[in-house]
Amino acid sequence: MSDTTPQLPSPSPSPETHVIDYRAAEQLLAARDPRGAVKLLDSVIAAHPENTAARLLRARAFFAAAQLRPAALEFELVLEREPDNAFAHFALARTHQRAGRPVQARKHFRLAAALDPQPDYLAAARFDE
């Protein structure tokens, strides 16, 4: 005996679903599950590639997962769209630093400090050297 009930196609994710996925990705990152956060953000970014906040969160998740090349690419994409984003410069600098690229790191540490002279950014910029 076979079931002849037609299967309905699953509905495509709605904008509300993407907001829920974004918020869940924030929680996963806070709970130290960056890979889970990346998986959720992939669908959000596929549907909304222009969403800089989602890309920045995914970059942070890549960094936390020690996936430095994808992290750097995402931070760079954010900076193409928002060149005055001090946090993105600082995070890209930390990514370069962790990857053993001190010259690139210093450049972005200094840009972050110039854009937002908060103590962490200023200390990392080492303007006195």
Image (spheres, rainbow, N blue to C red):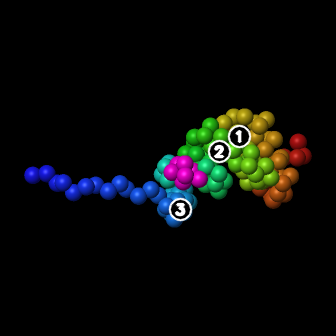
Q: Residue 15 — which label?
A: 3
Residue assigned mark 2: 74
Q: Residue at x 70, y 39 (%)?
A: 96
- Residue pictured at 51% horizontal, 65% vertical: 16
In terms of image quadrants, where is residue 11?
bottom left
Coordinates of residue 113 in the picture (x, y in percent): 83, 52
Q: Nearer the viewer, mark 1 or mark 3?
A: 3
From this viewpoint, is residue 57 visible?
Answer: no
Q: Residue furthest left?
A: 1
Left or right for 10, reference 30: left
Q: Nearer the viewer, residue 44 or 109?
A: 44
Q: Amino acid at mark 1?
A: Gln
Viewer-side residue, 61 vs 15: 15
Query: Which of disc 3 and disc 1 is earlier in sequence?
Result: 3
Q: Kindly identify the amino acid type of the residue bearing the numbered disc 2.
A: Glu
State yes or no: discs 1 and 3 in contact (Cβ < 8 Å). Answer: no
Q: Nearer the viewer's eye, disc 2 or disc 1?
A: 2
Look at the image and give the residue range highlighted in magenta.
Answer: 42-48
Residue pointed to by mark 1: 97
Residue count near mark 1 (Cα–Cα under 10 Å), binned few <14, some 14–19, many ≥20 = some
Find residue 107 and report its image quarter.
Answer: top right
Which residue sits at x=57%, y=42%?
66
Q: Which residue sits furthest right?
A: 128
Counting residues from the start of the chain, the first of labels 3 and 2 encountered is: 3
Q: Is residue 40 above or below residue 74?
A: below
Badge 3 marks a residue whose secondary structure is helix
Q: Is residue 7 left or right of residue 58?
A: left
Q: Taken as a whole, is the magenta stretch helix, strand or loop?
A: helix
Q: Is residue 106 visible?
A: yes
Kind of residue sitting beneath label 3: Pro
